[in-house]
Image (tube, grey):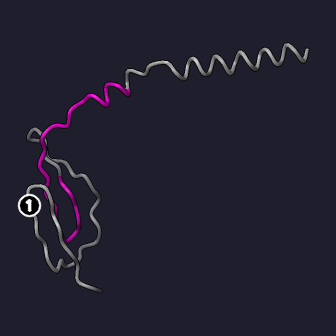
Amino acid sequence: MKRTTIFLMVFVLLLQAVVGCESNNATEQAQTKQHADFTFDVKPETFEVFVERDGVKESASEPIPARKASFVTGTSLLVDGGYTAQ
């Protein structure tokens, strides 16, 4: 009985190793997908971020309560800013 239990446990562990090492097509597809071109826009008062891709504009963040921005600078790749102390 003890020997059968040990063989069963070894078999289950080997089976898990074989199944776990199997190739997963879903992760391979996700890794090979190229990122599409997109643009973004930021509302500095609420730090709400919008992303536009293929003509579709979507919100990418939840807005925070409005605060007055002390400075905002930006390029097509970066937006920088700060808030006044409250």
Q: Point out the stretch of residues depicted in magenta.
A: 27-50
Residue extending farthest to the right is: 1
> Quadrant location of residue 86?
bottom left
The residue lying at 23 percent from left, 83 percent from top is: 84
Residue 28 in picture, x, y percent from top left: 35, 25
Q: Give the vertical position of 11 relative to 47 (above or below).
A: above
Tally of numbered tags: 1
Left or right: residue 59 versus residue 56 is right
Quarter holding the N terminus is: top right
> Which residue is pictured at 23% across the width and 65% down the height?
47
**Residue 60 spot, x, y in % from top left:** 25, 52
Say what secondary structure mark 1 lies in.
Answer: loop
Mark 1, Cα crowd under 10 Å, few <14 / some 14-19 / many 20+, is few
Q: Does residue 6 show up magenta in the picture? A: no
Residue furthest bottom in the image: 86
Please state which of residues 79 and 63 is positioned toward the viewer in this rendering: 79
Q: Which residue is mark 1?
A: 75
Task: Give the percent coordinates (x, y) of residue 34.
Answer: 20, 32
The answer to whether residue 41 is magenta is yes
Displayed quadrant of residue 9: top right
Q: Position of residue 17 (x, y in %)?
A: 60, 21
Tell me which amino acid carries mark 1. Thr
Q: Which residue is found at the position 23% from the left and 78% from the top?
A: 83
Residue at the (8%, 41%) spot, across then down: 55
For this view, does 27 lie left or right of residue 61?
A: right
Q: Is residue 25 left or right of residue 13?
A: left
Q: Which image quadrant for residue 68?
A: bottom left
